[in-house]
Amino acid sequence: MSLPQVEPGSERLEVDAGERGGRAAERVASEIDRANAPPVPDPDLRGGDATSRQPGSHPGHLERVVELVRFLRANCPWDAEQTPRSLVPYLLEEAHEVADAIEDGDDAELARELGDLLLNVAFQIVLAEERGAFTASDPVALVHSKMRRRHPHLYGDGEPLTWERMKSAERGGASVLAGLPRGLDPLSRAFRIQDRVSSVGFDWADAAGALEKVAEELAEVREEIAQAGNGGEDGRQALEMELGDLLFAVVNLSRLAGVHPTSALHRANRKFTNRFTALEKLAAERGLALEEASLAELDALWDEIKASE
């Protein structure tokens, strides 16, 4: 839904959507006026750097998006019928699109996608307001409090804390594995599990130990595949278990080597996709139908694509 541009000083936008909708329309129209008005220099941006400014020196930006969502809820049927759960797929999609923009190094696209993600965050805040759970100020206050607690030396509250001591205090005696989001994909969950247990010393000394573990798990997978002639559900489950152990070991190797496994796999996926797309194009140029080509012909095209990179 696009809001019209309003010249500064013009009449307020009128929306016949009841008293609540009218108030929301007036608020949004006021924001449009301010957005179209000449920019006012921010004293915090005239000099110095970000390290010298306290958090919260830019009040109002989040509230503008929250006001927009309130307006949409009051005047757009689709927005009005949304629930916290119905919006989860959109929230996750926007987070992935932000990640894509970062991977692509596209700052213009990143700004757009961050705006879309912020809209989803604001939507959840407004829905929470409507059910009396919390307001926009609460998440801001909570994250500010958490960061101050985790950086006492920056606020004159004490000496720097080690990450292990800090997380232990926050867990309050719960398991080091407690609190991992249920929605984490298995690859990220494996990484976080290993990272958590590493904080209490349960870890390899370096990547070399993890590499040996990968070799061990790979050997067990080979053995299980060699016995696959037994077949049946038991054989499939045993192979699944061994492959899971291998994947878990590879994630650990990646972590200890300083590479996040999701980033590594994302790059591998993109590289394969680019190469195979180029292979399809090359095959079409040579009049070769992929479904009719032999594996040797496809391998030759693949090698040619790799050599041209």
Image: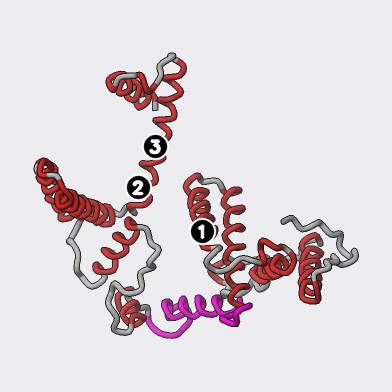
Query: Is residue 219 shown left or right of residue 164?
Result: left
Q: Check disc 1 and give the amino acid type.
A: Pro
User: Which quadrant holds residue 161?
Assistant: bottom left
Compare marks 2 and 3 and give the one earlier in the sequence: 2
Q: Check disc 3 and give the amino acid type.
A: Lys
Looking at the image, residue 266 lies above or below residue 40 = above
Residue at the (60%, 54%) spot, across then down: 111
Q: Nearer the viewer, residue 107 or 25?
A: 25
* Secondary-structure class at tag 2: helix
Q: Nearer the viewer, residue 202 or 282?
A: 282
Q: Check disc 2 and give the amino acid type.
A: Ala
User: Which quadrant holds residue 73?
Assistant: bottom right
Identify the disc placed on residue 271: 3
Identify the disc placed on residue 264: 2
Please provide the residue range marked out in magenta: 130-159
Looking at the image, residue 58 lies above or below residue 287 = below
Residue at the (80%, 57%) spot, across then down: 4
Task: Please tell me whether residue 121 belongs to the stretch shown in magenta.
Answer: no
**CA–CA distance in space, label 2 to label 1:** 24 Å
Colouring mode (rainbow / by chain / secondary structure / one colour): secondary structure
